[in-house]
Amino acid sequence: MYLSREDFQSIRDLINRETGLFFDEKKTYFVTNRLSKRMEEISCDNVKDYIHILNYDGEEFSTFVDSLTINETYFFRDYPQLRMFAEEILPLVCEEKRKKYNKTLRIWNAGCSTGEEPYTIAIILLEMIKDIYSWRVEILGTDINRKALKMCRKATYGERSLKDVPLEYREKYFIPCQEQDQDKYKIKNEIKKYVRFEYLNLNDGLRLQRIKNVDFIFCRNVLIYFDPKSCKEIVNSFYNSLNKGGYIFLGSSESMSRISAAFKLVRLNSGLVYIKE
Ligand SMILES: C[S@@+](CC[C@H](N)C(=O)[O-])C[C@H]1O[C@@H](n2cnc3c(N)ncnc32)[C@H](O)[C@@H]1O
């Protein structure tokens, strides 16, 4: 399928306005590919007609966005950063909270994709907080991709997702599936019960404002897909959502330096982390 520069730009701008995601001209092939697949599925053979549909049909727009997001993820992604969270940060934060008789933990995983990341966080909490049963813990996983959110709730994963899960945890927190999901593993309920999922578009500032009193935000490997202005707005919202002394974790190839100066960069024994002072 041929996509003119003008049509590419009008699709790109619409997607950017609504979601904050930005596709530069180098992504023309990728966008064209997803576009032609979708147009075929709904038997639309004119690009201008499809652009019109995207502008006026929210349901179709969401389906198209689902096809454009990159949902790559797996359990225990970026192990060194998670180790820092588990062994250095979490004990410190829990100790502080215990002193204040405030045994609550709120964690927001923004851009949770198919759920491996929030479930990893839940496993870490269970492993690290011995008296977790006396804490009020909430892990909120949010994403724009509705198909991914369905998989979060199904909580059934294959080998690709599980490749970095230590054997001990695989045996402890996963159940091998039967019948049609053979070779897959289901997360046990003792982990699932800590995690809640919601649809949330990170470009929707008003919705973001409603998330408050968070101790940790994990937004890893998400902001790389956004334009700089959207990144700034999202990170400003993150700042407001976090408690004083709260932490934010970005992906290993992402940095706050060009986005915001509001967070303090702190060096711990095993790495760097951003804190809201
Ligand atoms: C590469 S995945 C990262 C998954 C996980 N955080 C990790 O590091 O393994 C990026 C996720 O960001 C989500 N995303 C992209 N644009 C978004 C938006 N505007 N609002 C919310 N989520 C978005 C995608 O749907 C996708 O699931």
Image (cartoon, grey):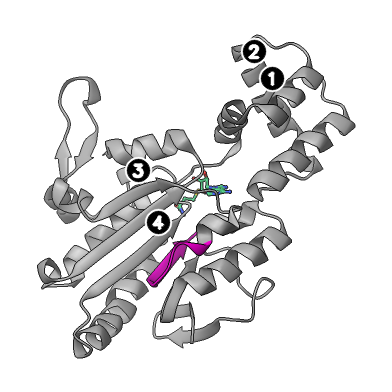
Whether the residue carrying mark 3 lies under 8 Å from ligand 1 is answered with no
Residue 98 in the image: state x and y as whole percent: 19, 85
Distance (Cα) linking label 3 and label 2: 30 Å
Foreground: disc 1 or disc 4: 1
Label 2: how many Cα within 10 Å (few below 14, some 14–19, many 20+): few
Distance (Cα) linking label 2 and label 1: 6 Å
Instruction: Please provide the residue range marked out in magenta.
Output: 209-220
Foreground: disc 3 or disc 1: 1
265 left or right, relative to 224? left
Q: Secondary structure at mark 4?
A: loop
Label 1: how many Cα within 10 Å (few below 14, some 14–19, many 20+): some
N-term-proximal mark, 4 vs 2:
2
Q: Is 109 a magenta residue?
A: no
Foreground: disc 3 or disc 2: 2
> Residue placed farthest to the bottom in the image?
99
Rendered view: 147 above or below 85:
above
N-term-proximal mark, 3 vs 4:
4
Residue on which the image places disc 3:
161
Name the residue at 77% across, 42% down: 13
Residue on which the image places disc 2:
40
Rendered view: 1 above or below 23:
above
Distance (Cα) linking label 4 and label 2: 35 Å
Q: Secondary structure at mark 3?
A: helix
Residue on which the image places disc 1:
36
Label 3: how many Cα within 10 Å (few below 14, some 14–19, many 20+): many
Whether the residue carrying mark 4 lies under 8 Å from ligand 1 is answered with yes
Residue on which the image places disc 4:
77
Rendered view: 221 above or below 186:
below
Which amino acid, by three-letter code, is at mark 1? Ser
Do callouts 1 and 4 mark residues in contact (Cβ within 8 Å)? no
Residue 232 in the image: state x and y as whole percent: 66, 67
